[in-house]
Amino acid sequence: EKPENGALARCVLEGYVWISCQAVKSSYYSSSTKPSDGPVLLTSATRSIIQLCNVFGWAEYKDVLVDAAEKLCERGKSDIALALVESLAPKNEDKSDRSEICSKLAVAAYDKILASLQATP
């Protein structure tokens, strides 16, 4: 039962990241679109994300969380990506999957930030 529920939760997170990155209509009456801000609401769900990861394993959600941080940085929301990393990081020093994944999240976010700074003339 656990793996199925974990897979379902992963699909929900992946779906949110994907849909939040789609272009949005400028207004209800307009057919023009504008770029989205990405998965900016993840920081408001970190308590639930931490609970999911603690139950089903942090490794199960690593790719989704790293992808979300990268998407935020690509959209100029590096502050939100770093806030996501900070809110998911363990409050004490531990050597668990959680620490390792938060480190990978931070590296992905900083890599995107540095790349965008280097691309700016």
Image (cartoon, rainbow, N blue to C red):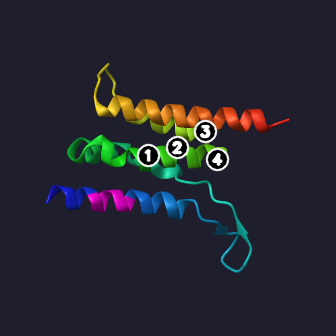
Earlier residue among tags 4 and 2? 2
Q: Nearer the viewer, mark 3 or mark 1?
A: 1
Within the magenta stretch, is there residue 46? Answer: no
Residue at 29% across / 62% down in the picture?
8
Q: Which residue is mark 3?
A: 78
Q: Amino acid at mark 2?
A: Ala
* The N terminus lies in quadrant: bottom left
Q: Secondary structure at mark 3?
A: helix
Mark number for residue 94? Answer: none
Examine the residues drawn in magenta and state their main secondary structure: helix
Q: Which span is picked out in magenta?
A: 7-12
Q: Secondary structure at mark 1?
A: helix
Q: Amino acid at mark 3?
A: Ser
Name the kind of residue labelled 1 in the image: Leu
Question: What residue type is disc 4 on?
Answer: Glu
Determine the CA span between mark 4 and mark 1.
Answer: 14 Å
Residue placed under numbered mark 1 in the picture: 65
> Could you say which disc has been placed on residue 74 in the image?
4
What residue did someone put label 2 on?
A: 69
- The residues bearing labels 1 and 2 have C-alpha atoms spaced at a distance of 6 Å
Distance (Cα) linking label 4 and label 2:
9 Å
Whole-percent x, y for residue 76 in the image: 67, 44
Task: Report x, y in % for residue 114.
Answer: 67, 32
Image coords of residue 34 (percent x, y): 71, 64
Of callouts 3 and 1, the N-terminal one:
1
Q: Is residue 17 visible?
A: yes
Q: Secondary structure at mark 4?
A: helix
Of the numbered discs 4 and 1, the one sitting upstream in the chain is: 1
